Image (cartoon, rainbow, N blue to C red):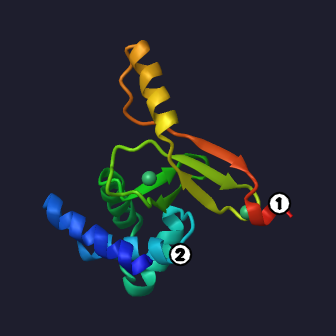
Amino acid sequence: MCNQSLGKIITLCQKRNIKLTPQRKKVLEIMLSADRAMSAYDLLDLLKVSEPQAKPPTIYRALEFLLEQGFIHKVESSNSYIVCPHFHDPDHIFILFICNKCKRILEKHSSTIEHDLKQLAQQSEFQIQHSVHEIHGLCKQCQS
Ligand SMILES: [Zn+2]
Ligand SMILES: [Zn+2]
């Protein structure tokens, strides 16, 4: 699953004619294999294993690039980052269900919600640039 996603992202970069530098690729690899939300400092610690010279700006530049390309999302409430499972569509509206107990995050999409939001914005002549939808609660495993 994680290698598959990485392959798809590499192909997408080639299509968009953008460069996935070794560092950006490494950060993405770390995020894919962790399969959980990670802070910049979590990432820095893990990047340092293979690149001891890595500094916070290294991570922030890589994260900025990955965010711009829509490969990852920022989780505002915990100041961390997750890999987006729908990275082929960079303009999608996403809803994050965040488990308070195990911190697992589920990304969901809804064409109905997306449509309603766009309509509300249109009615108010508002141009959406970025939206955050984070729902906190308990995941299935943590409910019992
Ligand atoms: Zn997404
Ligand atoms: Zn949970």
The amino acid on which the numbered mark 1 sits, given as a three-letter code, is Gln
The answer to whether residue 54 shows anywhere in this view is no
Q: Position of residue 34 (x, y in %)?
A: 53, 75
Q: Residue placed at 48% from the left, 52% from the top?
A: 74
Q: Residue placed at 35% from the left, 24% from the top?
A: 127
**Front-lying residue, 121 or 49:** 121
How many numbered dots are placed on residues in this image?
Answer: 2
**Front-lying residue, 34 or 139:** 139
The residue to which callout 1 is attached is: 143
Q: Is residue 62 left or right of residue 39?
A: left
Work out which residue is located at the far left of the displayed protein and give it: 17
- Against 119, is 35 above or below? below
In the rendering, which numbered label is found on residue 61? none
The amino acid on which the numbered mark 2 sits, given as a three-letter code, is Ala
- Against 116, is 53 above or below? below
Q: Position of residue 28 (x, y in %)?
A: 38, 71
Q: Position of residue 24 (x, y in %)?
A: 31, 69
- The image quadrant that residue 16 belongs to is bottom left
Work out which residue is located at the far front of the displayed protein and give it: 112
Q: Residue placed at 56% from the left, 63% from the top?
A: 37
